[in-house]
Image (cartoon, rainbow, N blue to C red):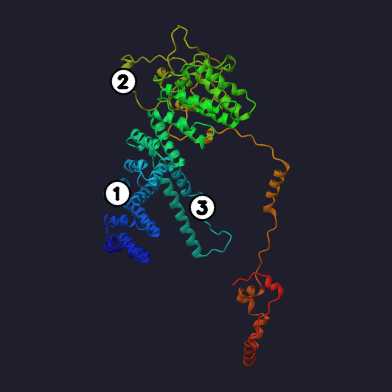
Amino acid sequence: MIEFLRENASNVAPDLRLTLMQALILLRNRDFIEATELLPLIFELLEIQDKTLRALMCTHIINDIRKRNTSGGNKNNFNKKVQALLFSMIRQEDSEMRAKKSLDVVVELYRRRIWTDGATVNTIAAGCTSKHTKIMVTALNFFLGIESKMADDDDETAVDTNALEVKEHRHSRKTLSRAHRTERQTKWKEKKIRDLDNKAPQALFPALQLLNDPQGLAEGLFRKLRGSNERFEVKLLAMNMVSRLIGSHQLLLLSFYSFTQRYLTSHQKHVTQVLSYLVQASHPLVPPSDMVPVIKTIANNFIADRCPEEVIAVGINGVREILSRIPSILTEPDMDDFVQDISLYAHNKNKSVTMAGRSFVNLIREEYPALLKRKERGKDHVKDAKPLAYGQSHVSTGVEGADLLEAYERGELELSDESGDEEDGFVECEEEGEDVEGEEEEEGEEGEAPELVPVSANGSAEDRQGRKRPRIDAVRILGAEDFARIERLKAEFKVGGKRRGGDYRTGVSKSDLDDGFAPSDLDAYHVNRRKNMEERMATVLQGREKFMMKSHAGGLTNTEKRRTKNQAMVKHGRAVREKISKSSKQVVKGARRNSKGKVKILMKHDKKKRRRT
């Protein structure tokens, strides 16, 4: 059959061709033929214009690979052979249909968590720079949305605990068969719950993190984007992919920022998406000198009095997001005038512009308050706050967040769910049950106890001898409670906290660079316009529709009701008794009278009823 289909597949009837392929699939499911014998034939038959046959073959490939990977056996050898065939088809540019269907199969296998290794991801990445548009779009959509699709699949396949309830029919009569059925349902429920509890969570890295050469992929895709004549929607996909690669791996592709400037106009189609892609591509390793022209272009085209209020709000939000990811831009020359001009929009009469302007001012207060006017800085700003210059990095000299814990124990910070009345004195740490290496040698032979440093809520930065107070993580061993309190302090003071004194300032909350930036985060605040009388009445009438009486659909006729009546209800009726009491002559006479071609006369009310047969 394989040789017959290989030689005469395009000449035989579609039904016969489909039947032969179904027979081969059945032989493959019974392990009479190997996958390496059937797959080459399937790839050849993909060129035939038969949608039903293509769907059957692609479904078989997915189910066959899933079956071999979920069951026992040597699946590694099987995967190597099948992956070699599929990956070679994707990388070949001679046949678009074979490459497209092979790519669809690999993407579906990744979505079902069957092939999630780096080789699969890098093979799909090869399709991002394909000369065929359909293959390129499929590969780009994979990297941009596969995680959300897999999360949706997990939510759909999650077993609801309410669906596992066993109906024991406590109100009805008990029978032996019903008791056995209830017992089987109870065992099935216990097995399902046990399987869910024993199922280990499968860790899955984002597909973008499994790429071997993200810099090469970004450069190749951007090179194709610059010389592309595709639709604008396809260009947006490519721009989104390049920006995600730059932001996720912190790549340097400086020509991308100048390329996006041509689309930064208020009348450009999908300009909010272009702005979000520009924000995605912003990270601290980008030179601030290359980003200054970009934010000034946004300011000139969006943040101007001639622009509508929604456009101004979008422009301010875009500049704020870029500055929050690259704070070193604020250290460039002539940025004080730029910041002060935008801060004036915090007092605009439009609410959306005012909210965008205030959020911009709050960012500058935390990053570089010296750029603002004195009245705009706020009373709680840190005078010496200044972003790090380009190339500088903050190096941790101890436990991250230990300064938060120290400020909390001194009484400078408060947690919202605690009263804060900490008692003075020594802090005791719980014994972890593990000895520190070299601890006994440091104590010496005399067994002297180490000197304890008291932590007082009223203590200052220096002790009574004038020496600088050591860090809290250098004084004592932090326990589990201390680390838990540090995490709570980080979570609370990431947004803002209460302070009793001193100049303590927490870091600015940065969004995760691995996640995409939603264009809706740049949209302006929309004020709900008051509806007029006609619109309110339309809403009221629309809400009344579900309370209206439904039109009568028509019930069953008496003839139909008699036809479905229980035999115990009919056997004592008058019609049955008369039929039984009839003689043979009366039966023959009635049959002759009814067979003379008389037409049954329907009454008027019977004609209106909907007949059911």
Cα separation, mark 2 vs mark 1, equals 51 Å
Image coordinates of residue 514 in percent, x first then y, are 42, 33
| Nearer to the camera, 375 or 317 | 317
User: Is the C terminus in the top left, top right, bottom left or bottom right quadrant?
Assistant: bottom right
Which residue corresponds to the image point at 35% horizontal and 46% vertical from the top-left? Answer: 115
Secondary structure found at label 1: helix
Q: Secondary structure at mark 2?
A: loop
The N terminus lies in which quarter of the figure?
bottom left
Rendered image quadrant of residue 29: bottom left
Mark closest to the chain's N terminus, 2 or 3? 3
Q: Mark 2 against mark 1, which lies toward the viewer?
A: 1
Q: Amino acid at mark 3?
A: Ala
Which residue is at 48% across, 19% downward?
Answer: 330
Residue 198 place in picture, x, y as percent: 40, 46
Amino acid type, label 2 = Gly
Give the class, few, some or many, for how many residues have Cα within 10 Å of label 2's Cα (few <14, many ≥20).
Answer: few
Which one is earlier in the sequence, the residue at label 2 or at label 1? 1
Disc 3 from disc 1: Cα separation? 36 Å
Picture coordinates of residue 364, whole percent (x, y):
52, 21
Task: Note whether residue 298 is visible.
Answer: yes
From this viewpoint, which residue is outermost toward the bottom? 585
Q: Nearer the viewer, mark 2 or mark 3?
A: 3
Residue with the most extreme top position = 465
Q: Is residue 537 left or right of residue 45?
A: right
Q: Which mark is residue 438?
A: 2
State if disc 3 and disc 2 touch (CB < 8 Å): no
Q: Which residue is mark 3?
A: 163
Which numbered marker is on residue 319? none
Which image quadrant is residue 59 in? bottom left
Determine which residue is flagged by label 1.
Answer: 79
Q: Give the x, y percent position of residue 510.
A: 47, 28
